Image: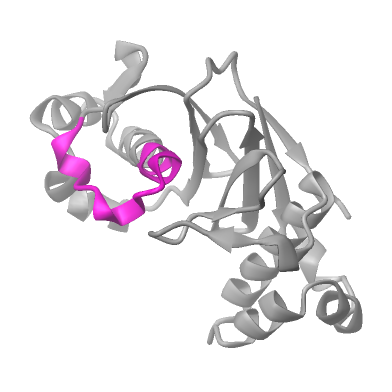
């Protein structure tokens, strides 16, 4: 499965006029963020939807808990973190997440992981925390429930194969990319992940 990513420095080079014309609603939404990097990540997600899936923002609809979709198009999921906005798409429900690896994140481990996940994480805390968290987040996004789900109530140990969460079997895969953990969950079998940068 492909993960498509666009760097914020790529987004930054695109003329504002083009971005406003291409996705006026998202452009307005992006301006509400206080931090420049957050604005660029928001715009990057919109560019990926347009470039990879051919989605016009007027086609976008949102599920009960905020998951975007476009009727008649592939299922997709977006995420952003660090220098990246990313997107993954599939014929089946899909979720994707990216998280820059940061020691500060480790403090929440006991609130979001099961006992077996905590044990597995302790052997190499920094990467394993972020691997576990992005897998959990990708499943939560794939279900369409997002943070309505309690992440501590299900286990996603990478060594255990497919996960049954919310009465659905989820296939997962992850990779480390430029200081970030990236994970994808799909109702379809994932035969590895391939990261493709979109240069626009």
Residue 8 seen in render: no
Relative to residue 97, is residue 35 depicted above or below?
A: below
Residue 142 belongs to magenta span: yes
Name which residue lies at 21% across and 24% down: 120
Quadrant in which the N terminus is drawn: top right
Viewer-side residue, 40 vs 48: 48
Task: Decide if residue 2 is on the left or right side of residue 51.
Answer: left
Magenta-highlighted stretch: main secondary structure?
Answer: helix
The percent coordinates of residue 70 (x first, y second) are 66, 52
Task: Decide if residue 97 is on the left or right side of residue 52.
Answer: left
Residue 59 belongs to magenta span: no
Residue 102 seen in render: yes
Report the number of discs.
0
Quadrant in which the C terminus is drawn: bottom right
Name which residue lies at 61% across and 73% down: 37
Name which residue lies at 40% across and 59% down: 64
Task: Decide if residue 20 is on the left or right side of residue 188.
Answer: right
Name which residue lies at 36% across and 15% down: 162
The percent coordinates of residue 28 (x first, y second) are 67, 85
Relative to residue 175, is residue 86 depicted above or below?
A: below
Q: How is the image coloured?
A: one colour
Residue with the most extreme left position: 115
The percent coordinates of residue 24 (x first, y second) are 76, 80
Query: Within the image, what quadrant is residue 164 found in?
Result: top left
Task: Decide if residue 168 is on the left or right side of residue 49.
Answer: left
Relative to residue 173, is residue 24 depicted above or below?
A: below
Query: Within the image, what quadrant is residue 58 found in?
Result: bottom right
What segment carries the magenta color?
Answer: 137-154
Query: Within the image, what quadrant is residue 196 found in?
Result: top right
């Amino acid at each position: 499965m492909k993960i498509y990513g666009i760097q914020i420095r790529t987004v930054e080079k695109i003329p504002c006029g083009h971005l406003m014309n291409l996705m006026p609603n998202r452009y307005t939404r992006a301006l509400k963020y206080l931090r420049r990097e957050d604005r660029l990540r928001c715009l990057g997600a919109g560019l990926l939807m347009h470039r990879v899936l051919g989605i016009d923002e007027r086609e976008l609809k949102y599920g009960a808990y905020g998951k975007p979709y476009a009727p008649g198009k592939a299922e997709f999921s977006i995420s952003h973190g660090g220098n990246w906005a990313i997107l993954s798409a599939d014929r089946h429900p899909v979720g994707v997440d990216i998280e820059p690896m940061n020691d500060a994140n480790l403090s929440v481990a006991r609130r979001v992981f099961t006992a077996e996940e905590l044990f597995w994480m302790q052997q190499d805390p920094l990467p394993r925390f972020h691997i576990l968290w992005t897998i959990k987040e990708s499943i939560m996004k794939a279900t369409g429930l997002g943070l309505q789900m309690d992440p501590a109530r299900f286990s996603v140990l990478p060594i255990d194969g497919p996960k049954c969460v919310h009465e659905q079997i989820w296939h997962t895969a992850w990779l480390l990319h430029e200081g970030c953990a990236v994970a994808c969950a799909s109702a379809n079998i994932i035969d590895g992940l391939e990261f493709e940068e979109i240069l626009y």
